[in-house]
Amino acid sequence: MKDRIQIDGVWYVRELEPEPETEFLDVKIHTSISVHYENDDYSWEAISLINDDGSQYDGFDIKFTNKNIIPWKDDYWDNMKWIKGVYENNPDSIKEALEEMNENGIKHFRSFLNELKKIGWF
């Protein structure tokens, strides 16, 4: 056995040093659900946090991926006013959306938002 040694007829056992205690912070974790849609050019993932009672928070975030750029570019959208503006075809919101997507991409995004509306996300 490698963990003991005999000296003058007496066996000694190696003592293991105790592992230092890890201090954990008191954290509050959240559960979320997500809905995902993508095409050849873009990817959209809507993420909604869940309350402790199982209901959804109001609003959601969108992880947007532009697959036309190498490496792909991710962005996170959490402005519900802007998201609703794109859905409602608001000219100011559409103008900003054109900075991230082409017109066809906006059509797909609006269709994705329409599906989210159908399932009660806004």
Image (tube, rainbow, N blue to C red):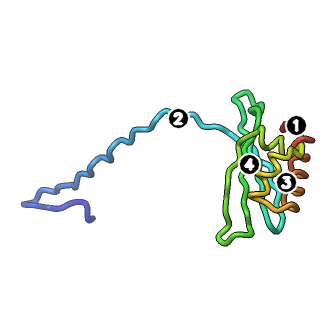
Q: Position of residue 68 (x, y in %)?
A: 74, 69
Give the Cα separation between the discs numbered 3 and 1. Answer: 17 Å
Residue 102 image offset from top left, x and y in percent: 82, 62
**Alpha-carbon distance for marks 1 and 4?**
16 Å
Q: Amino acid at mark 4?
A: Ile
Crowding near the residue tagged with mark 3, few <14, some 14–19, many ≥20 C-alpha atoms within 10 Å: many
Q: Which residue is the site of mark 2?
A: 27
Rate crowding at label 1 as few (under 14), some (14 to 19) or many (20 or more) other CA atoms within 10 Å.
Answer: few
Q: Amino acid at mark 2?
A: Val
Q: Which residue is mark 3?
A: 109
Q: From the viewer's perspective, is the residue at label 1 or at label 4 nearer?
A: 4
Q: CA distance from mark 1 to mark 2?
A: 30 Å
Which residue in the structure is indicated by mark 1?
120
Which amino acid does the dot numbered 1 rest on?
A: Gly
In which quadrant is the N terminus drawn? bottom left
Upstream in sequence: badge 4 or badge 2: 2
Viewer-nearest of discs 3 and 2: 3
- The x and y percentages for residue 95 are 80, 52
Tell me, for residue 62, which label it has, or none: 4
Q: Secondary structure at mark 1?
A: loop
Looking at marks 3 and 4 on the same chain, the residue that comes earlier in the sequence is marked by 4
For the residues labelled 4 and 2, the Cα–Cα distance comes to 24 Å
